[in-house]
Image (cartoon, rainbow, N blue to C red):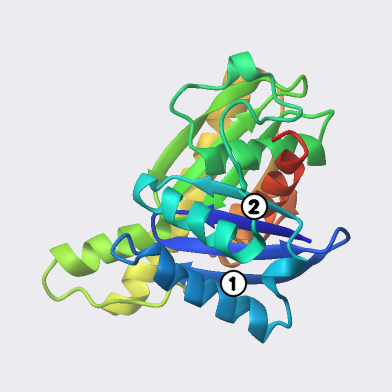
Amino acid sequence: MLLVMDIGNTNVVIAVHDGTDWVGNWRIYSDAKKTSDEYFVIVEHLLENSTFKGTDITEAIVSSVVPNLTRAFQKVIKQLAGFDPVMVTHDICPGIKRETIPPELGYDMLANAVAGHNMYPNDNVAILDFGTALTITVVSSSGDLLGASIAPGLVTAVNSLFHNTAQIPQVQLKVPEKAIGRDSDESIRSGIMYGYAGLVKELIAKMEEELSQSLKVIATGGLSATIAPLIGRIDKLSPLHTLEGLRLMVSSG
């Protein structure tokens, strides 16, 4: 079985693939203060509750955008499975032309690009990832990584309002009934949900204008299913998209 760990700024996604399908996935908070021993206990408990053992793991891959946690999870996998995981770098990019990858591109965005190009190999593809940041990664039909666009994520924007603005409540992000809100909750949800839908539609339109070609649009991330109906340009919802990219990268590691 394959163990995948995607270490982000807010969460660590842990998943197991049995060669046919994803048979377990979990999400825990990213906490740089925790030791590798603490994370080992957490991961071992999650696996055991799903009847998996460390000895079931035959392959492992780690993607990390949090350097302080990278080594900790390397140690966790070494303790669990007895071997070192594949660590994602820009050199592990099946289907993507290495020389076109921007030096600063995050590994999660690279994994998204790999999975997106694999999903639509004959099309230009934009992958929307609604995470801590909203990222749009663009890949050409020939496997060139054309670049990306990055904005604050939906939850990040709401948290910024909540922490930095007096009398603004914390709200649940769901689609409001109307764009013109009558109270703070409805007004914030309108601004965030309709505002971000408009942001995404404008970025996609601008990207297609620059390319003079259309884009296949894939959406992933926690709020992708909620906001997708407002965007209307999404061809595929892919909840485990980043994990799929990492799975494809294992054989190249």
- Report if residue 16 is visible in the image: yes
Q: In this rendering, is residue 27 above or below 46?
A: above
| Horizontal side, residue 220 vs residue 134: left or right | right
Q: Quadrant of residue 49?
A: bottom right
* Type of amino acid at the residue the image marks with label 1: Trp
Q: Name the residue at 61% across, 14% down.
A: 99
| Horizontal side, residue 33 vs residue 210: left or right | left
Mark 2 Cα shell of 10 Å, populated few (<14), some (14-19), many (≥20): some
Q: Nearer the viewer, mark 1 or mark 2?
A: 2
Q: Name the residue at 27% across, 76% down.
A: 184
| Horizontal side, residue 224 vs residue 1: left or right | left
* Type of amino acid at the residue the image marks with label 2: Phe
Q: In this rendering, is residue 140 above or below 49?
A: above
Q: Name the residue at 62% across, 25% down.
A: 91
Number of numbered discs present? 2
Per the rendering, the mark at residue 26 is 1
Mark 1 Cα shell of 10 Å, populated few (<14), some (14-19), many (≥20): some
Q: Quadrant of residue 32?
A: bottom left
Q: Nearer the viewer, residue 252 or 28?
A: 252
Q: Which residue is identified by label 2?
A: 83
Residue that protrudes farthest toward the top in the picture = 99
- Report x, y in % for residue 143: 73, 23
- Report x, y in % for residue 1: 79, 61
